[in-house]
Each structure stands twice: as C-alpha cells, then as structure tokens.
C-alpha cells in the first residue's frame, strides 16, 4: 500500500499539469499576452509553442517524479501569476475586449485573475507539501 500512496498524491498534480499542457497547445495561433504586450502572428505562435514545450516538460517531470520538476513547476506558477497581473495592469481593457470572442466585463477579468492567482498559490502550497514524493534525483527526463 505504501507504493500506491505517492501515485495517489501526484494524481491531482498530473491532471492539472495535463490540463495546463492542453490549454497551452490550444493557444497556438491565438494572440498571446506576455509581460504587458499582446503578441500576434509569428511571435504569438513562438510563445505558445514555447509554453507548450514547457508544459509538456513539466507534465513528464511530474509523471517521472523528477525532483527538479517540483521547483520548476512552482517557479512557473509564480511567473504565470506575475505575468497575469502585469498584463492586467498594463494592457488596456479595450485591447482584451477587442481580442475576446465573448464579451467580458473588466470586473470579471479582474476576478478571474484573482481566482486563478489563489488557485496557483494553493497548488504551490500543495507542491511544497508533497515535494518529498518526487524521489527521482536525475536532472534528465529520458
């Protein structure tokens, strides 16, 4: 039974990492807000591709229980939080409204950013709590 416990502790994390990877893949070709600038065209595709590769690396690292992945995932989550708040502070709401397929109010955008921030902070706390479950010390995935 003790062999199953780490897998069960990592299951929610693997699901979140997989969902994050799918979201990164689905952003390919769409405008990409990054550090206060909305990129379009080739730059947006390159940023979405890089985000997809990072997400894939993190998912594989979680599945292989790579020790380095815990710290990389926590850093990635913190960077994602900073990026979202920088985008919200710098990019005018009219730009978001222009790019959105459905109408979203400014208050809803702020609430969603705050909600995702809370979720990512809780995920980082969970990661820190289960960090010892990551017992693979190899820096290489393969």
Image (cartoon, helix red, strand yellow):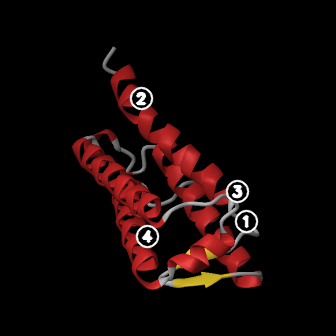
First in residue order: circle 4 vs circle 2: 2
Helix, strand or loop at label 3? It is helix
Q: Quadrant of residue 79?
A: bottom left
Q: Residue at x 28, y 47 (%)?
A: 122
Quarter of the picture containing the N terminus is top left
Q: Disc 3 versus disc 1: distance between alpha carbons?
A: 6 Å
Disc 3 crowd rating (10 Å Cα; few below 14, some 14-19, many 20+) is few
Residue at mark 1: 28
Residue nearest the observer in this picture, 94 or 21: 94
User: What label does residue 84 carry, if any?
Assistant: 4
> In this view of the protein, can residue 60 be seen by the observer?
no
Picture coordinates of residue 66 (x, y %)? Answer: 42, 50
Q: Viewer-nearest of labels 2 and 1?
A: 1
| Disc 2, SS | helix
The residue that mark 2 highlights is: 7
Q: Quadrant of residue 69?
A: bottom left
Q: Earlier in the sequence, mark 4 or mark 1?
A: 1
Q: Which residue corresponds to mark 3?
A: 26
């Amino acid at each position: 039974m003790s062999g199953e416990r780490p897998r069960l502790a990592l299951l929610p994390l693997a699901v979140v990492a997989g969902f994050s990877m799918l979201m990164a893949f689905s952003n390919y070709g769409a405008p990409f807000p990054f550090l206060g600038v909305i990129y379009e065209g080739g730059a947006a595709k390159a940023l979405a591709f890089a985000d997809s590769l990072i997400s894939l690396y993190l998912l594989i690292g979680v599945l292989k229980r790579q020790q380095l992945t815990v710290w990389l995932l926590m850093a990635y989550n913190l960077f994602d939080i900073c990026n979202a708040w920088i985008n919200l502070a710098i990019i005018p709401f009219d730009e978001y409204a222009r790019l959105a397929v459905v109408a979203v109010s400014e208050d809803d955008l702020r609430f969603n950013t705050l909600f995702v921030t809370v979720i990512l902070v809780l995920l980082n706390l969970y990661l820190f709590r289960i960090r010892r479950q990551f017992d693979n010390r190899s820096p290489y995935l393969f």
